[in-house]
Amino acid sequence: MPVKYKYTFLCLLVICVTLLCFIWMVKDRLCEFTLKEQNNELRAVLAYEAGR
């Protein structure tokens, strides 16, 4: 494998691992988004049911 492809693969691997770690850390808050600005508050909540 050429060196160019090794670095590309390594970069993709680092990005994927970083995204997985971030999602794992904030997994409880992924279903809710809150934006506060002065007197206004915008809240979006994703309603879902886990498949059984």
Image (cartoon, rainbow, N blue to C red):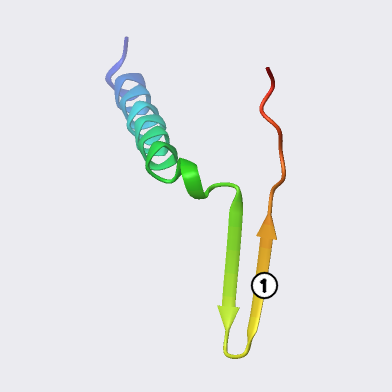
Q: Is residue 44 above or below residue 8?
A: below
Query: What residue do we see at 31% from left, 26% from top?
Result: 10
The secondary structure type at the circle numbered 1 is strand
Quadrant in which residue 19 is drawn? top left
Query: What residue do we see at 37% from left, 27% from top?
Result: 8
Q: Is residue 50 above or below residue 26?
A: above
What residue occupies the far front of the structure in this picture? 52
Query: What residue do we see at 57% from left, 90% from top?
Result: 38
Q: Disc 1 marks which residue?
A: 42
What residue occupies the far bottom of the structure in this picture? 39
In-front residue for pair 43/6: 43
In-front residue for pair 10/30: 30
What residue occupies the far top of the structure in this picture? 1
Give the quarter of the figure containing the C terminus. top right
Question: Can you give x and y, in whole percent of width and height, for residue 15 in the image?
Answer: 38, 35
Q: On the rendered structure, is 25 left or right of 41?
A: left
Q: On the rendered structure, is 22 left or right of 38?
A: left
How many circles with numbers are drawn on the protein? 1
Circle 1 crowding by C-alpha within 10 Å: few under 14, some 14–19, many from 20: few
Query: What residue do we see at 60% from left, 59% from top?
Result: 33
In-front residue for pair 28/13: 28
Indicate the amino acid at tag 1.
Answer: Leu
Question: Can you give x and y, in whole percent of width and height, for residue 1 in the image?
Answer: 32, 9
Question: Can you give x and y, in whole percent of width and height, for residue 21 in the image?
Answer: 35, 36
